[in-house]
Image (spheres, rainbow, N blue to C red):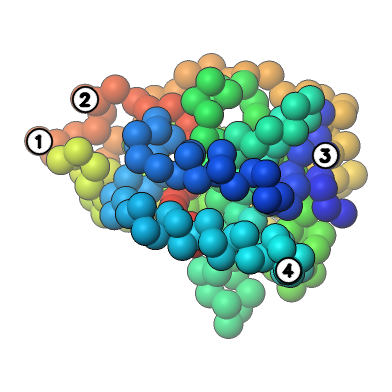
Amino acid sequence: MIPIRGPRLSLRDFRLEDLAAYRAWRLPGHAWQELDGPYYAAESAAEIDARIDRLRQRIVAGRWPSPRSRLLIADARTDRLFGTVSWYWIGQESWWPAAGISLFDEHRWRQGLGFEALGLWVDYLFRAEPRFRRMDLETWSGNAGMMRLAETLGFTLEARHRKARQVGGLDYDSLGYGVLREEWIARYPRGFAARLREDPPTPPPPASPTPTSPTTSDPATSTPPPAAPARKDSP
């Protein structure tokens, strides 16, 4: 089942030769970090090095969980990484997970690659773990790309926590999207990979972020940022 191959990318395990590039993408100063949970504290250099060390140990040992907790997004032609997909628990006691995606390279945004990668990932998670009855995506109202991606994949906006996030002195809503297993299967009865073969994605038009309730710091007056991951995640 691993790697998971799409028309333009693959989802695969990390290799030792990926670590230098992965570390470089996690260092400060990249556009994706402005959208990937920018309300959280940034990783320090020591925390990044610790993350890389843990990942190196896992690669050397060959100990990968099932289902995988994270996969690298690699270009189908060059095999070079340009992002990751992951999942984490919202409620482990009820088998309630959430998926996430990070597209590091801003030159690959708005090309339908997030749709391809996240769709393949969610499809894999539902197939690999029958106890997952639903899948969530968490984001914020300043991330128009993630909102559009969730809706395009078939997720439903189920929660809006108003003025729950602050970025750059502006108030934003925290958003929760979800899809049930049976909804996913009904939408992609032959699997998401088959959907990609039958109807390859086209780049979507630009979208504006959903504003919070009107305030003096209303994000509707700011420039909408491009697509990026739902939230920061653990190693």
Task: Say which element carries label 3.
Answer: strand
Q: Is residue 28 visible?
A: yes
Residue on which disc 4 sits: 61
Residue found at x 63% / y 66%? 57
Within 10 Å of disc 3 (Cα), the crowding (few <14, some 14-19, many 20+) is some
Q: Are marks 1 and 3 in contact (CB under 8 Å)?
A: no
Within 10 Å of disc 2 (Cα), the crowding (few <14, some 14-19, many 20+) is few
Q: Position of residue 72 (x, y in %)?
A: 66, 46
Q: Nearer the viewer, residue 60 or 3?
A: 60
Q: Position of residue 16 (x, y in %)?
A: 68, 50
Position of 121 relative to 219 (above/below): below
Label 3 amino acid?
Arg
Q: CA distance from mark 2 to mark 3?
A: 40 Å
Residue on which disc 2 sits: 221
Q: Nearer the viewer, residue 158 or 96?
A: 96
Task: Report whether 128 appears left or right of 15.
Answer: right
Q: Earlier in the sequence, mark 4 or mark 3?
A: 3
Q: Earlier in the sequence, mark 1 or mark 4?
A: 4
Task: Say which element carries label 2.
Answer: helix
Position of 220 relative to 168 (above/below): above
Quarter of the image where one finds residue 179? bottom right
Residue on which disc 3 sits: 5
